[in-house]
Amino acid sequence: TGSTRPERILAAVQRKATKGDARSVVNTIDQYCRYQEWAMNVGDEKGAILDSIVCEVKPSVMLELGTYCGYSTVRIASMLPPNARLLTLEFNPAYAAVARQVIAWAGVEDKVVLIEGPSGDWIPKMKEEFGVTSFDLVFLDHWKDRYLPDTKLMEECGLLRTGSILLADNVICPGTPEYLEYVRGSPRYESKYFRSHLEYTRVEDGLEKSVFLG
Ligand SMILES: O=c1[nH]cnc2c(O)c(F)c(-c3ccc(F)cc3)cc12
Ligand SMILES: [Mg+2]
């Protein structure tokens, strides 16, 4: 049986990236996915927008929905101060196994809590299991059909406070129409679209930043 794409990404990281150097891990994955084989990392172009928002928000507690190989996990964690925490949720155990090793190689494991399982099950347990009061910033990058239900679930579970920010990937490609309609139409959110491109391609995609108004 051959390797999987995530395993080949991990092999590239362990072969080419400097251990303990998060930026080197990010650059290695971008190189691999641009020139060897495409993969669904947020990528360098949208990643720069993600960086600017993480820098602006300076979150103490952040949630990432959808870890995949850990590319954005490492990108975000490398920008967080030591006492900040990034909780990242991954449904697929094979992806989570690779992500743990990518996160370790980058040396950011102290700032990251990787949780395996369905977001719908874990979001209601965030307070009791992880001592979360509310999230300062949430990066939605999992399954497009879960963006809206998980957002409503976070509202219902009191995990969003006035000023909490949602940043959603892939709002154009593959597209999250119901989520966009909700955050753009709701008086409880102030939304803004950051136009970009689908990772490693010239296809349009973008990030939607939505501030929860309470
Ligand atoms: O399922 C996804 N979860 C999270 N992020 C994704 C992404 O950034 C993609 F580009 C894509 C994608 C996959 C195939 C395409 F042809 C286009 C986009 C999918 C996801
Ligand atoms: Mg994505």
Image (tube, helix red, strand yellow):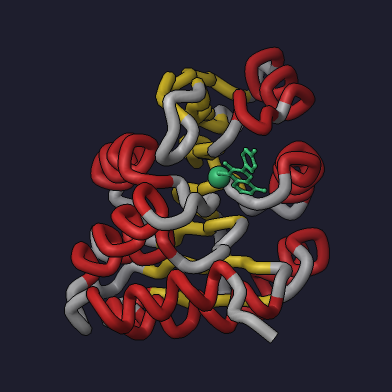
From the viewer's perspective, tell me whether residue 16 is left or right of residue 172: left
Percent x, y for residue 149?
Answer: 81, 43
Residue 193, compared with residue 18, is above or below; it is above
Given residues 102 and 75, the one toward you in this image is: 102
Identify the image quadrant of the C terminus: top right
Q: Give percent across and percent down for residue 210.
A: 53, 28
> Which quadrant: the N terminus?
bottom right
Depicted 17 relative to depicted 71: above or below? below
Residue at left 41%, top 61%? 71
Residue drawn where x is 54% and y is 70% of the image: 6
Who is closer to the viewer here, 37 or 49? 37
Q: In which quarter of the image is ligand 1?
A: top right
Q: Where is residue 57 in the image (x, y as percent from the top left)?
A: 32, 43
Answer with the quarter of the image where residue 129 lies.
bottom right
Regarding residue 80, the answer to whether it shows in the image is: no
- Specify the quadrant of the image occupied by residue 73: bottom left
Q: Which of 28 and 93 is in front in this view?
A: 28
Q: In this view, does 70 lie to the left or right of 53?
A: right
Question: Is 79 placed left or right of 189 in the picture?
Answer: left
Residue 113 visible at all:
yes
* Front one among 7 and 164: 7
How many numbered marks appear?
A: 0
Residue 126 versus residue 213 in the image, above or below: below
15 to 122, vertically: above or below = below
Residue at (40%, 77%) from the top-left corner? 102
| Residue 27 image point, x, y percent | 25, 58
Q: Which residue is rendered at x = 67% and y = 32% of the image? A: 174
